[in-house]
Amino acid sequence: MAAAATASRAGKTDPLLDIRNLRIEAKVFPPGEPPRTITLVHDVSLTLQRGKVLGLIGESGAGKSTIGLASMGFGRGGVRITGGEVVLNGRDILKGGVGGLRRLRGREVCYVAQSAAASFNPAHRLMDQVVEASLLHGVATRAEAEKRAVALFRKLSLPNPETIGERYPHQVSGGQLQRVMTAMALCSEPDLIVFDEPTTALDVTTQIDVLAAIKDAIRDTGVAALYITHDLAVVAQVSDEIMVLRHGRLVEWGGTRQIIKEPRQEYTNALVSVHEIAHDEQKPGATPFLSVKNVTASYGGGKVKVLKNVSVDIFPGQTLAVVGESGSGKSTLARAITGLLPPEQGSVTFAGRTLANRLADRPKEDLRQLQMIYQMADVAMNPRQTVGTIIGRPLEFYFGMRGRERDQRVAELLDKIEMGKGFVDRYPAELSGGQKQRVCIARSLAAKPKLIICDEVTSALDPLVANGILKLLLELQKEEEVAYLFITHDLATVKSIADSIAVMYRGEVVRYGPKSQVLAPPFDAYTDLLLSSVPEMEIGWLEKAITGRRMESAGN
Amino acid sequence: MSSPIVKLIAQRIALGILLLLAVSVLIFAGTQILPGDVAQSILGQSATPEALANLRESLGLNEPAYVRYFRWLGGVLTGDLGTALSSGQDIASSIWPRLKNTLFLAFWAAVVSVPLAIILGLLAVRYRNGFVDKLISGLALASTSLPEFFIGYLLVFFFAVKLQWFPGISTVFDGMPFLDRIHAIVLPATALTLVVLAHMMRMTRAAILNVMQSAYIETAELKGLRAFDIIRKHAFPNAIAPIVNVVMLNLAYLVVGVVVIEVIFVYPGMGQYLVDHVTKRDVPVVQAVGLIFAAVYVTLNIIADIAAIVANPRLRHPK
């Protein structure tokens, strides 16, 4: 603390954080092989001036979070910092020992995690957690710290700033919790905050508010920040400089404008350029093969209505995209169609006849026609089965294929998803995220369905990998004549693959029609809000969007 | 605010009562299918058929089983546990002092073992996979692996025979001064502690280690908290439910599982009483003791359930 004070007085020109040739290693235990040491970060250097924001971007595995945590001398799991220096406020924190690190964490450097919902202790009130670090490090008395926390709650535009601290984490929403976490990081007045994907888990409409709150708080308190994200459009709104990382190495480092407007490296260019997928919208056919008619469904025996009078049609070989924020009923619609949540009213018709409401009452043939792919590919597969078994299972179950016939079909399917024969004997744990999702696609295709319901299938993937998956899905659609019900909150995805779009809000379809109509003005209020919330890769977009909203809410 | 919690707790208690009723049926049915005839065992082999018939009549043994069950249950509910066949004494009045003795022993064993187990569990987590953890786990497991009678005799051998610090026979009687009473039960209480310690310690360790994977533990680490404070303040409150469960299970064992220890130390508790009357085929006593043991067991488990409900902030503070 004293060191921080003297350093800030001593020289404004000294950087706050100076990382030199940082090398980080981890011990990995690959299945069936002896443990080995891999290098996560290869000799990366960076400097950060007081009050500035440096964005760290890259795909997963690029080492962004690892570098961010290294600025607090912290390594997750078996991660160890094996080389280089981390100079903060003029001293190498790696030489300060465990006690030195403890005095620094929560005092000079604070951390804002991706999932605030998981990062707050469910057993304690928010206020106790927000002021904990301040009290621990003797920065303030309890009364002072609480006063400061309330002021921060107000600055971050949280509702009821005086009393929200009384609540427990489960009593506030995800977006609010993320802001409380930012307040928690700011409360002990640190010199540096590490933001680790703070808005990634939020809905776009919530993200914009949290982003604006974080930006204001950084500006008003003069704290420096490392802002980690994989979303360039987001980082362009808050950072002064951007560092692009890949496979633990530095790719490019420059001012925000230079990185997004004049990238010098090819990889940066690939990240920056918008990935439009060429897809011509197909006009709706004469008759839909699957119709959802006036479906109403609820949880808890009618207590919580989650779908209200929903009607949509799906045409052969076409894609219906369902968009909306979390809680809008997108996934529930899928559950109603598949029979996992039997509708209370309304019906689902398939090929001219009404499907049984309950999954258990449907014949095998109906089950075969409707397949699903999930967001979390790794939990949708049995970790103890090989890829061959996973893809072969529907072949046995629906078609009674055995032996050589089945193996041949599995090989064909692997070919279709652009993965070779070599993957047949692999286990899910040995695959990358994109590969896992491809195996799930192959498994659903194996049933030769008419419709595949894709529930946020690209949300957990890096943009470039997600792009590959979307392209694959479109190709397979052409080859197999399969229709998709594509559930997503990502409007960019919708724009590239949908033929028709249903916008959902609080269990209702608020806008529905062919893509070209839905995405053309005039918009209804909610669709307008949704579209205007998608970050654009342009400096100053955030301010413009926020001003636009204020004017609207003022009644213009 | 507390309406869902009150409802849940009421449900647990109602369920407990139902469970006890079911247990009473089982105990009654169980003693009915035991071989042998009560009247015969009271009067002996040389009894005349008339005498047997008369006794059966006077004991109500000729009535249908369900009538006898409800009569017995009605008696139990009004505090009348019946009369011991072997001695003709009122069961309730002879059980009461013994139950007090058993609870006294169990209480002091719990006072020592529960905090000790939890603190050792916390320490094992703090130094997990290190020397301290292995030492604690090793010793605790060793003490559990030894049969309790062996532990009992070991304690008697060293502390009663060799060192002569404590009596080898734990005699207690009415009007005995408190400290003398404590002195008398040190060895059986120690034996019980050694028996139940490891289970509670290991479960505490496992429950907390499970919580240590959570993201909020990392948050606490990144605030600069000390390792032990993180465990105590952030991990322990979220592991209370499983810990309370295993603690209650072991407390129940301290009451209902003391038979062996009581016999070894000749301690005048429920266990001794039960063993004495089982050998005499004294069915009413066995029924009464069985019911009391079941009540203790069910009550402690209800307390564990309620503690788990109250420890859950989502139930305590609904949205």
Image (cartoon, coloured by chain):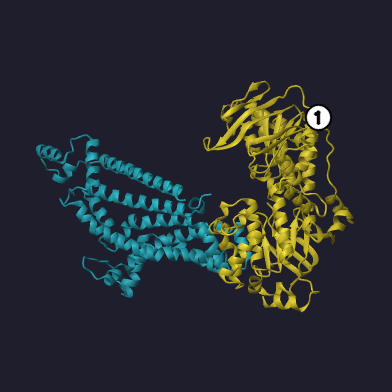
Q: Please provide percent x and percent y for residue A402.
A: 68, 30
Q: Is residue B242 left or right of residue A47?
A: left
Q: Residue at x 14, y 43 (%)?
A: B45
Chain the render paints yellow: A
The extreme top residue here reads: A352
Residue B246 shows in this picture: yes
The extreme front residue here reads: A555
Chain the render paints cyan: B
Residue for badge 1:
A282
Q: Residues within 10 Å of mark 1 (few under 14, many from 20)?
A: some
Q: Is residue A63 left or right of residue B253?
A: right
Q: Image quarter for residue A448?
A: top right
Q: Image quarter for residue A377?
A: top right
Instruction: Tell me the chain of label 1.
Output: A
Q: Please provide percent x and percent y for residue A260.
A: 85, 54
Instruction: Say which amino acid is labelled 1.
Output: Gln
Element at label 1: loop
**Pick the front one: A459 or A212:** A212
Q: Please provide percent x and percent y for residue A68.
A: 73, 62
Above or below residue B154? Residue A178 is: above
The N terminus of chain A: image quadrant: bottom right
**Pick the front one: A213 or A93:** A213
